[in-house]
Amino acid sequence: MRLSNRILKMQFSPIRKLAPFAAEARSKGIKVYFLNIGQPDVKTPAAFYDAICTYRPPVLEYGDSQGLQALQDSFIEYYKKLGTEYARNQLFITNGGSEAIILTFTVLCDPGDEILSPEPYYTNYNNFAEQADAKIVPFLTKAEEGFHLPAKDVITSKITNKTRAILISNPSNPTGVVYTPEELRMLADIVKEHDLFLISDEVYKEFVYDGLQYTSSLSLKDIEDRIILIDSISKRYSACGARIGSVASKNQDFNYNIMKLLQARLCASAVEQVGAAALRETPDSYFEETKAEYQARRDIIMEGLAKIPGVICLKPSGAFYVVAKLPVDDAEQFAIFMLSEFNHEGKTIMVAPAAGFYGTPGMGKDEIRMAYCINQEALKDAMHILALGIEAYKAKKGL
């Protein structure tokens, strides 16, 4: 029987595709350090669980389609501290940041329409676009330039009559780059000149290092009606499994029409929303300690990479990922080698081949993405194993 072209074109996650190799390695008693996935190991604030444990309504009813008011207010209060005020009819609770992006694409795009995004980009953007019968059109950023945006004319050369928006992740998954105010200003000028939206995925905004001042797209007041802000509690509060996100906009037409989709899927989980609403009481010390921990891990990664000849990776300033160019011929084959053929003292690592984060065929073939979501001692060991593994792989391949 026939399946849809949409699903047949959709790719499997490059973050998870090598999981069978990891499972096989573990079945042999090999310890695997998982650097492939951005699953934080920082403890979720207790307030989330406390709120859920005391939530016992006589009937667990449907919630409002736009979200629990207490949770909307929590997000609204958060953005007010950042200098932007949203009303409840401008901010909507979603089933994770993923649904927020899917709904946004569906509102903006007709079949065949295009969303521009700097590559490498979060690989699921492709699948989200497929669900909306749209297409991600990439423009290249380079490891040698720290994955900062290219010149304005490079971006505008990709714009066609099908282009509906520019999508960025800031700080970036997968590269960890934090865009400068000048880069954001350039994007603002482009969307104004070409009548586009700017979709800003800012789920990692709490994780910016080295004292760098983070600039949100919300600072671009002259295009505030063109900004669609994507957010989530997953990374900020280490609550990935709760699947609570949000989409916010000051564009009246967008907000009116996204409500059709919100109502069609009824509501986000009421139970998780109750827990998420309680997170507004999380003290600033939680974020300060978490950021300091991730910065220390970032430094361990960079110190380890600097010791490996032929690796190219400029220090990222945000999120908890790095994309590194390795002195190997094929990063996916190297990743499989590390799981299937190599271990050091009964230990190995799992990384994500970076080709799956590119939209241009052939790009990223010698690059990997690593998430620094394991403790510092484990990370030091993992970087030592990476160095030994690269040496062993090159010897095997005669590189």
Image: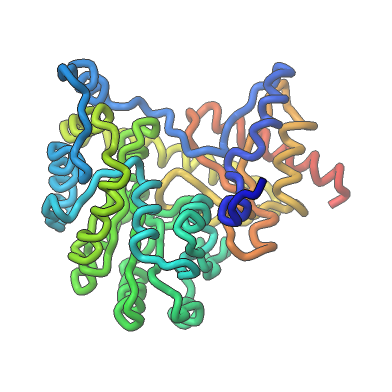
User: Do we see residue 23 in this rendering?
Assistant: yes
Horizontal and vertical percent for residue 233? 30, 39
Q: Position of residue 79 (x, y in %)?
A: 18, 51
Q: Is residue 384 left or right of residue 60?
A: right
Q: Nearer the viewer, residue 90 or 316?
A: 90
* Foreground of the two, 322 or 196: 196
Q: Nearer the viewer, residue 345 or 192?
A: 192
Q: Is residue 291 visible?
A: no
Please name whichever residue, 99 or 41, is drawn nearer the observer in this view of the structure. Answer: 99
Residue at image location 18% in from the left, 65% down from the top: 252
Q: How is the image coloured?
A: rainbow
Q: Residue at x 15, y 48 (%)?
A: 76
Which residue shows up at 37% across the image and 70% down it?
A: 183
Q: Position of residue 378 (x, y in %)?
A: 55, 27
Residue at screen point 61% across, 45% down: 12
Which x, y percent locates residue 270?
Answer: 24, 31
Is residue 324 left or right of 156 when viewed as pictured? right
Q: Quadrant of residue 58?
A: top left
**Left or right, residue 138 beside residue 282:** right
Vertical arrangement, residue 107 with respect to residue 350, above or below: below
Residue found farthest to the front = 1
In the image, residue 55 sits, relative to residue 306, either above or below, namely: above
